[in-house]
Image (cartoon, grey):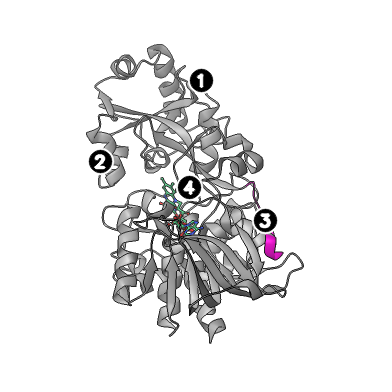
Amino acid sequence: MAVLPAEEARFEYSVPVVVIGAGACGLTAALAARECGAETLVLERDAKPAGSTALSTGLIPAARTRFQRALGIADSPELLAEDIWRKAKGETDRAIVDAVARAAGPTIEWLADRHGVAFRLVEGFLYPGHSVLRMHGTPHRTGRELEDALLAAAGRLGIDIVTSAVATDLYASSDGRVAAVRFSRPDGAVETVGCEALVLGCCGFGGDKEMVRRHIPEIADAEFWGHVGNKGDAIKWGRALGAAIADLGSYQGHGAVATPYGNPVNWGLLTNGGYQVNLLGQRFSNEVRGYSEQAVEVIAQPGRVAWNIFDELREQPILGFTDYQQIQALGGVKKAPTLRALAALVGLPSDALEQTNAAVDALRAGAPEDRWGRSFRDSPPLAPPFCAIKVTGALFHTQGGLVIDPTARVLRVEGAPLPNLFAGGGAARGLSGPSNWGYFSGGGLLSATTLGRIAGENAARCAQ
Ligand SMILES: Cc1cc2nc3c(=O)[nH]c(=O)nc-3n(C[C@H](O)[C@H](O)[C@H](O)COP(=O)(O)OP(=O)(O)OC[C@H]3O[C@@H](n4cnc5c(N)ncnc54)[C@H](O)[C@@H]3O)c2cc1C
């Protein structure tokens, strides 16, 4: 992963806009650049494009969409921006938050109406940090469905996606202008393509164990459920080009990955009144602050696991999620007519589980909040059959990256933009601030799609 002198670049063909990475960011950027009239080529390391996007649940928050209006939900870009800002405790870039919040609704409608992505609003529960219902997903709530819809849209626009092509090096002049990208093929062949503008949609560094250990040691020993091909290349090239890089300690964790199955368990089980216990049958945290910060809470428990405890009332809104159906089919959802029977079924101490449940019921009945700051008020007690899923904490993707301006242009350490380099999604600094607690539910794909679109439009203009 080097940046080589532009004079050394030898290429037989050149394309106005080159995009590295065919996940949500890269594909959205390519769609936008192509619509703006620029011929666009995408380089993707995998034979079948997937990225973390295809591994995800595919849910994207957006405000003031027609999907919200159809259900009478009042929302605004300002409220979305405030929610993101509050979650990040004000420790992120306000200009990017505002730009993303403004662009999110139009991007969702653009993807739906122009590019055939079959979004629906997720109903039945609020995600942590969201003031209103605003999560948009495809019918089966899978990232594979989202990725396939984006690939189909790219195909309709005739965008070339060169697969099995690992971008290895950039060629740039001394002022930082990228002239070409070198990439390698599985047979060892090396090719170079020239460009007028480059979009980095190659995500973060979750797939580089050494980088994860260096920058976020607290989660280095947890499982990584994102795309292993995301090895921090944007950061490596950015460093060589003198780009500013921020928040490398920031990441999206997840505190309820069904174990041993590997599917994320929807947080609606918890926000609607379920809770987590450790192997001692005891609660240990405020489960609804956010699923990202919950990852380290769970892996700090005995055996690095917890059990989500809930009932069928809480299960109802998430029955349509493919991930949940897969956990069910694999036998991961345990049910029993009494708490004691549930405890016996899953191997938890029954007295402790009953005491924990009684304490939660007392909170439901009126106490303002528990010692971790969680309120259960207005949430009815769990009713039989009682349900449980064994979960662990995992790293989903990293949030630190290249510092960009609201036009998705990559900035130098000194603050001025590099001439023709753009970034979005996991390649760019996220919206989360410096750590794990700032991750706003759906913030990953929110950055990928909105900044991808902005990057693509501006890369096309830059290439003219
Ligand atoms: C289990 C799970 C569930 C999630 N659920 C959600 C959710 O519901 N909502 C949400 O907002 N976020 C979610 N996320 C996070 C979300 O998946 C990511 O934030 C998002 O997919 C990032 O998009 P991206 O386009 O930046 O990266 P990716 O989708 O990872 O795409 C990057 C692409 O770049 C390619 N690439 C990398 N390096 C190179 C190179 N050198 N040359 C060529 N190609 C390269 C990769 O192969 C990959 O295809 C989830 C993550 C996981 C793991």
Q: Is residue 197 left or right of residue 41?
A: right
Crowding at mark 2 (Cα within 10 Å: few <14, some 14-19, many 20+): some
Front label number (2 vs 4): 2
Residue 67 place in picture, x, y as percent? 33, 66
The residue under label 3 is 246
Ligand 1: image quarter: bottom left
Residue 133 place in picture, x, y as percent? 40, 57
Q: Amino acid at mark 2?
A: Gln
Element carrying mark 4: loop
Q: Amino acid at mark 3?
A: Ala
The magenta stretch is 240-249
Crowding at mark 1 (Cα within 10 Å: few <14, some 14-19, many 20+): few
The answer to whether one can see residue 393 in this image is yes
Residue 421 versus residue 196: which sits nearer the camera? 196
Mark positioned earlier in the residue sequence (1 or 3): 3
The answer to whether one can see residue 105 in this image is no
The kind of secondary structure the magenta stretch mainly shows is loop
The residue under label 2 is 325
Is label 2 within 8 A of ligand 1 (CB to nearest ligand atom)?
no
Residue at 67 percent across and 54 percent down: it is: 91
Q: Amino acid at mark 1?
A: Pro
Element carrying mark 1: helix
Crowding at mark 4 (Cα within 10 Å: few <14, some 14-19, many 20+): many
Name the mark on residue 128: 4
Q: Is residue 373 above or below residue 301?
A: below
Say which quarter of the image contains residue 73: bottom left
The residue under label 1 is 302
CA distance separating discs 2 and 4: 22 Å
Quarter occupied by the N terminus: bottom right
